[in-house]
Image (cartoon, rainbow, N blue to C red):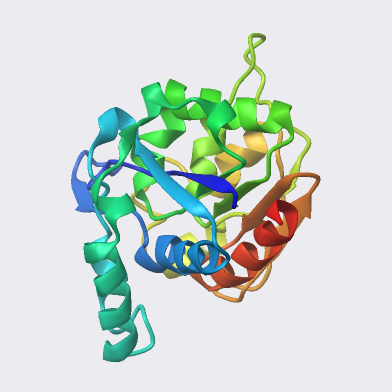
Amino acid sequence: MAKILFVMSGADRWTLADGTTHPTGFWADEAVVPYEAFRSAGHEITVATPSGVIPQADPASLTAGANGGEDGARAVRIVVDSAPEFRSPVALSGVRLEDFDAVYVPGGHGPMEDLAVDADSGQILAGALRAGLPVGVVCHGPAALLAAVGKDGANVFAGYRITAFSNTEERLAGSADNAKWLLQDRLTEAGLKVEVGEPWAAHVEIDRNVVTGQNPASSGPLATELLKKIN
């Protein structure tokens, strides 16, 4: 049995370029699909957030439209509401990385609000990379990689080939024009090699111990690939 750390956003609002906020959080199935895959494989999960706040699912991610119908939405909501790990997170500042065998970061716009600038999250991810632990990140979750900088100020993931929610997808979702910054651009500026596929289609990139997925459809394939590195 492996112990997997879920690094999750504690934000429930995303601050836009015009100063307004938009409800957000983690994208439900990006947490639920890997959660169920890892648990089914017999692994233990711990959720950590800034200050240990209970993570909130983006309301849009709980709708029938986001889950292939009402049955899918109901199944996702049941896990979000009942899984004890999501209800009892620990604080990122108290995480001992040596207690874990892998790290996973789900998306949603929440990570762009807090994890992108969270020093504790950045330290965990940088430490996981140095230790050679499997690291899985999906959709907007790669925003958390922006905080993973070394003593020289350079991003420790610079040079890694990853994928993330693309500029095209952000535009198609209607969020690009009022965003303070776009994830694909910011990751590229930090020195990461961002490869993207067709909008909304599953796309996974694997580079050494780092497994990344582009969008919600990539959550399942990412979990499968990450399990290969854990087992």
Vertical comparison of 206 with 203: above or below: above
Vertical comparison of 210 with 117: above or below: below
Q: Position of residue 47 (x, y in %)?
A: 38, 44
How many numbered discs sit on the rendered protein?
0
**Is residue 169 rendered to the left or right of residue 190?**
left
**Is residue 20 rendered to the left or right of residue 194?**
left
Q: Position of residue 202 (x, y in %)?
A: 62, 73
In the image shown, does 32 or 101 lie closer to the viewer?
Answer: 101
Q: Which residue is drawn at 68% across and 45% down?
A: 134
Q: Residue at x 62, y 41 (%)?
A: 101
Q: Can residue 25 be seen in this view?
A: no
**Is residue 81 rendered to the left or right of residue 46?**
left
In the image shown, does 33 or 97 lie closer to the viewer?
Answer: 97
**Is residue 186 rendered to the left or right of residue 171?**
right
Q: Can residue 211 be seen in this view?
A: yes
The answer to which image quadrant residue 3 occupies is top right
Vertical comparison of 169 with 4: above or below: below
Q: Residue at x 69, y 52 (%)?
A: 230
Q: Position of residue 82 (x, y in %)?
A: 24, 64
Q: Position of residue 90 (x, y in %)?
A: 32, 35
